[in-house]
Image (tube, coloured by chain):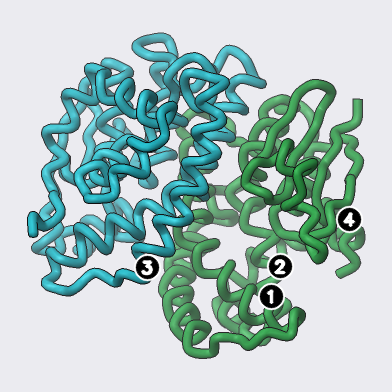
Chain colours: A cyan, B green
Amino acid sequence: MAMKVYGNGMSVCVARVLLCLHEKETEFELVPVDLFACHHKLPSFLSMNPFGQVPVLQDDDLTLFESRAITAYIAEKHKDKGTDLTRHADAKEAAIVKLWSEVESHHFNPAISAVIHQLIVVPLQGKTPDAAIVEENLEKLGKVLDVYEEKLGKTKYLAGDSYTLADLHHVPYTYYFMKTCHAGLVNDRPKVKAWWEDLCSRPAFLKVSPGLTVAPPTN
Amino acid sequence: MVVKLYGQVTAACPQRVLLCLLEKEIEFEIIHIDLDTLEQKRPEHLLRQPFGQVPAIEDGDFKLFESRAIARYYATKYADQGTNLLGKSLEHRAIVDQWADVEVGYFNVLVHPLVMNLVIKPRLGEECDAVLVEELKVKLGVVLDIYENQLASNRFLAGDEFTMADLTHMPAMGYLMRTNINRIVKDRVNMNRWWEEVTARPAWKKLMKMAGF
């Protein structure tokens, strides 16, 4: 039976899982969850994810939430097909993949998600973005990207010379970020820019990006 | 060869690694990085950890940072030694990962600023943001209700055995329990039961002794 992913293609965390499924050439069924009607807060959904968020993965008896736990599971289960996303055959290389995945989770994600929230989500709620929060987090993001610029001067991808989950986890938020007026933060760093353009050339990305349909206001 | 850990034994992230090494019965040496004098921001340490944080490890030629990546590496490398922290089957490992990720996105994101305001700022003579503390307490209460429910039907977070999912929470939880808002855990029956059980483990007791707590 194909894996089921509960969520919508425009959600960053769902897109993370979809990218992984495509990289691993794994069949799945996307089950939409109507977030605007708060279906993710209904008891039937909370029984799958008590934190009431997407995505949720169902694979036979297993129900899993947390997008990065889901990608790790898919990558492990299907380690013998598709892209090697975890370098599972070598413990040290696998640790380096995990290291840069942790960097995305702890250093990159908090800063970029705060910017995206202000520039894309807040206007959708009819409110005005908080410029101070944007500025503070752009500064933090810039410092993280400085570290990436140096690392990507030594290796083609974050965890070495092949594409792994460490790169993949960055893609959905970066895609939205590049639609804002602050794309220069990436474009002004040649190695980061080249890395980003490479990530966007992957077939899995081309399948998932059409679903990332939320956009910042055009004014 | 002995694992070299660069960090401060009282800090939460180095403690996460130390607790793992103790549970796995792996020998280590702590090289103290003095956070009070910002040693972690100096060039020598930035070569080990470009974000200027602790911990970082050196194991022969192998170098790593990010406490959760380090803990996972040693839990995997020494899978057959000491406590099994990863889970037994692929599915169980996924559940362990799930609750370990919950620690990052739901627990630490609230407990870290709480501890900063209730413990670190007073120590530095800075003013605590009382309004923020109240907001964070409310949010943490909602999260801990979910944990309470999980622990009502599971002995530990990911099932019947102690795993990385529990371990990864312990250093920050230890700090939280030493604040004047620890009732937020103590008043929840299953959380309190879980906390008492995990802190009775010999590895935790050794760590607390090393940290002087």
Q: Residues within 10 Å of mark 3 (few under 14, many from 20)?
A: some
SS at badge 2: helix
Residue at position x 42%, y 49% in the image: A109
Residue type pointed to by label 1 = Met
Left or right: A82, with B135 as reference point: left
| Res B200 seen here | no
Which residue corresponds to mark 2? B174
Label 3 or label 2, whichever lies nearer to me, is 3
Callouts 4 and 3 on one subunit: no
Q: Residues within 10 Å of mark 1 (few under 14, many from 20)?
A: some
Residue at position x 55%, y 31% in the image: A150
Q: CA distance from mark 4 to mark 1?
A: 18 Å
Q: Earlier in the sequence, mark 4 or mark 2?
A: 2
The quadrant the C terminus of chain B occupies is bottom right
Q: CA distance from mark 4 to mark 3?
A: 42 Å
Where is residue A75? Give x, y as percent: 41, 23
- What label sits on residue B177 in the rendered view? 1
Circles 1 and 2 in contact, beta carbons < 8 Å:
yes
Q: Chain of mark 4?
A: B
Residue type pointed to by label 2 = Gly
Q: CA distance from mark 1 to mark 2?
A: 5 Å
